[in-house]
Image (cartoon, rainbow, N blue to C red):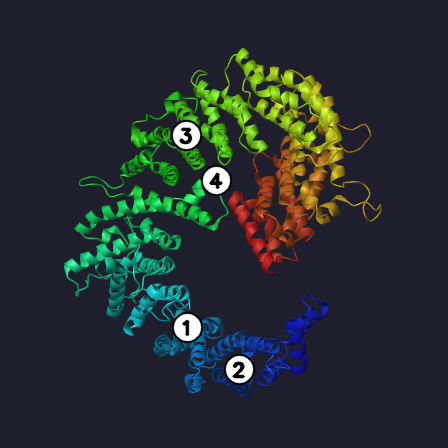
Amino acid sequence: MAEQLAACARQLFEGESGSAEQRTANVWIMQFQQHDEAWQAALQLLEMPVRDPLTHQTLAGPELVAMQILRLKTQQEWTHISDQQQQAVRQTLLKLLEITCVADGGLSPVSCRIACVTLADIVVKSCKTWTGWKNDVQRLVDAGIAAQRQHKGAAVLAEVLGAIPLQILASERMWIADEIHQILTLFQAEVEEVMTAVQMILANIPDERSNALRCLECWIVGCVPTHEAFGLTAAHLFTRGLIDELFNIVISGNEEQAQLAAGIVADSFVFTVPAPLSETMINAVLHSGLRLVEAIPVFRSDVRSPTGEMMTKEQQTTACRGISRIACSLAMNHAPILLWNQVPGTQATIGSFTPEQKSSLSMQFLELLLACSSYDDIDVVQPTLEIWFFFLEESSSQSEASWQLLDAPGKEHVVSVLSRLVNALIERCKYPQWFVDKQQLVSDDLEIEAISDLRREIADTMLSLFSKWPGGPGKPTGDYASCVKGICQMLSNGKDIALIDALLFLLSYMVELFDAISSDSESEDDPESFLDPESGGIDVLLGVLDRALNLPMHPLVINGVAQYLRSLSASLALPASVYLRASMIICQGLQYTASFPVAVQSLLHSSSPITKYSTVEERASLLQALLQFCSTLQTKTSQESEGDLLEVTFRISSGVSDADFGALCSTVLSNLTVRVQSGNPIEASNSVYMLGRALGGVQDQQQGSALVDQLWPVVSACLLQHKGDDICRRAGVQFFLNVITHLQKEGVHPIEAQILDVCLWWYREGIAPDILTCCSRIVARQRNNSGFQVSAEQTFERLLADFRGKLHDVTGTAADGGVQSMEGFLSQHHEADKMIPEVEQFMKLAREVLSSVPQVLTKNRSNGEPTLYWVCLDLATRLLKVDHQMQEMCDAACDFLLDAMRCQPEPILNNINVFASEIVRAVLSFLGPRRQYYRVRNLWDFLFQCIHAPQMPSQIRGGFLAAVSTVVIEEGALQSILPAEVCQQMPGELRMRRQRHRFRQYFTQFAAEAANS
């Protein structure tokens, strides 16, 4: 079998990629490795490797496959083979590793690592019988030294020792609790040997430093998470002198080794077992704190390494990252010792330090954390933010850094530290100058994305600090108003765009600090609801917008002001004058491509309170500025943003005289009314879209109606000219939606009738959910208009027929007529998901018809066919039943079914047993395999409303409860996935669970059980 294994391995590694032969070889290997013969075949290939006939070198493919099989078999079947077989495997591995240590013809690096991990696995599993494993491994090292290949022996030693903790973790399910305890105790005694080996390699074999550090990393406390006390702590490292060696590597090692060393030291202080700290651990904390403080000069611009050489920026950053990681670990786990010099949980103090030394160490450690937070590298700054976030907390944990741990002089000094920290964090929020020069707001550059993420964390940290900021003598804590005022002062003095952007970003977060009345809780119709600007420091927040008037213009500044205004308006009920002042600034952003969309969206957001609470005269300047941009727009932007500009311009013009409105239309729209007559469908469709957006901004009903009368002839002619163009049709429907709102409501307006005709004409041309939305708006406008019923009936019946055609809902099926059914189309067609918006909008249209003109659905049809009501019910039920994997379709169908049962229950009550059973059957099917593709919570809510909603007629609720009994108990619909006892209890359980969350939890629990069945 070894020959066959070798041949398949060669095919796998050397054959044509993706070929049938290669796939066959892979399948054979996967099957063969499960058989007992795989042990012997793998050992044979390793002992007598396949060699290249020309070079006589071992072929990598067969060797690697054999080693992987041996690893797999050892993991899964070690305890199932005889002692003799175990001995053979062990000796083969030792022999292969010895050859690797003494000569070049040994295992490849990858196979060697797998062999070392496999040997470590055997050591763990055979620790009670193979007591001499250390001597056997040491012989490998000695053999390498004797052959002048110390680095190979050291690598094998580090790999084997380093893999042991992970193998303990992987194998712990093999043992009972007492056995695990014995094994952990046995290997805990080996930590001295591990440290000896690591120190030997670090001191004598520089090329294997990384391997030695990885080995040590694998033994650090927490390496076996289920047994937190197992492994090496900082006390172990300190006793053996490894702490200093690791610190030296952090500061002067290469990037990989420095990161490894920093991680080892940092993790060694994370000791979660609740027990008093030993004196050795306390000394390790203090010693490490002093080493960190001594390293503060590393953060300066010109610094030399311990060897005396000038450090490059890259070396400095690597060292600072390591220092920051260690410092944060100490601050989070042993802050009382460093800041208070007292052992947590006791009254014992660190006796070896004088009071002056204690205070000095505390202050210097805070300065170190400040240096980390000030350094211009995200990986150095980010770990410190969590420290500062909780630094001023009153109920900080016993081990975390807190200003309450400081003595009186320390608390006075901490205000200085925090003030400098705030300035440093603001600097870290700044984008680089090259990005500012590009005049952009976003970038896919990794540096910009990283700064964007960091500044959000910084904002949260500053929020926490400001909310608890230490007050002066006799003043309470939490003087956030002064803090924010200081940032505002920086804003007024600033000309640096990057700094201004950072300050505006942070200020938008600071709004949350002020205990202000939410605009959501006040009536916008009540002018008295606006806050007094002098109350509660709100003048500080409003002052930001005053200072913004003098800021240099730049897309980042515009974006910052817009973001700040949005944040402020979400928290406060602002007077119109504030919106006007800010909008005049934001309006300048329309001259920049990057800030145009942001600016125009902000203007749209502000337009409602501006028009509601200001006079035409007060907003005249803003209107003139917008008109200027509309008339001379040169900024390259999207069609949607241009439409936003038109809409907001017409919104701001609300209240102008008819003459001024006419002049406005002539100025802004005359060019569009010419372009809309173009023979180019793209230019024509763009013009139709823009005219529709302008209509959408008109607030006065009379002016809007007049504008519709003016625009309708040219737009309808344009749409007729380009009736075959899909782009024009889409623009036309959007235009219709804006037209409808300005039509008179008395009866059916002629334009309204034309729109319906065009919609019916266009709808069959393709997927067009907006057309259905348009029809829904018209139906809603004609509610209670008896003269609209005939038109509504004709419209809905035609739309229904076309809609069913798009769903392939025809009488013939693939089985009997060769036509694909709706069920087949939705569950199998690759483009079925494109129908999701259309299904959603059609069901909304059906609900609107049901509510506004129900006779359209319930009226008996002359041809004797079922009413449209039952056709829609049947369609919605089938949409719920089909396994189409589209949640939105299910939700739309459920919403229609609920409205049908609430608004027109009589037809359903006449056939409640069949109807309810069909629905229950469909919903309960989601407990089966279909559940993973849907947010079934929506479906459980739907069933809850059918059974318990008070708006639902009681007869229907009772019918659904009876249907649950029929489907679950009599039909046994769930017997394949739920126990019989549960099925018997389900109707009663559903009857009793009248709270929505309890009803939902019941089904969620069974869905989880069904998934595991």
Q: In terms of sequence position, does the residue under pointer 3 or pointer 4 come before the other? A: 4
Q: Above or below — where is 730 with respect to 476?
A: above
Element at label 3 = helix
The x and y percentages for residue 651 are: 52, 22
* Label 2 to label 3: alpha-carbon separation: 75 Å
Q: In terms of sequence position, does the residue under pointer 1 or pointer 3 come before the other? A: 1
**Residue position marked by numbered label 2 in the rendering:** 106
Q: Above or below — where is 384 with respect to 781?
A: below
The x and y percentages for residue 610 are: 45, 23
Q: In terms of sequence position, does the residue under pointer 2 or pointer 4 come before the other? A: 2
* Mark 2 residue type: Gly
How many marks the image carries: the answer is 4
**Residue position marked by numbered label 3 in the rendering:** 519
Q: Residue furthest right?
A: 817
> In the displayed structure, does residue 288 sit left or right of residue 801?
left
* Residue 355 position by quadrant: bottom left
**Residue position marked by numbered label 1 in the rendering:** 215
**Residue position marked by numbered label 4 in the rendering:** 440
How many other residues sit within 10 Å of disc 2, few (<14), some (14-19) or many (≥20)? some
* Residue 238 position by quadrant: bottom left
* Mark 1 residue type: Cys
Q: Which mark is residue 184?
A: none
Whether pointer 4 and pointer 1 mark residues with C-beta atoms closer than 8 Å, the reply is no
Quadrant where the C terminus sits is bottom right
Q: Above or below — where is 630 with respect to 45?
A: above
The residue drawn where x is 48% and y is 42% is 442
* Mark 3 residue type: Ser
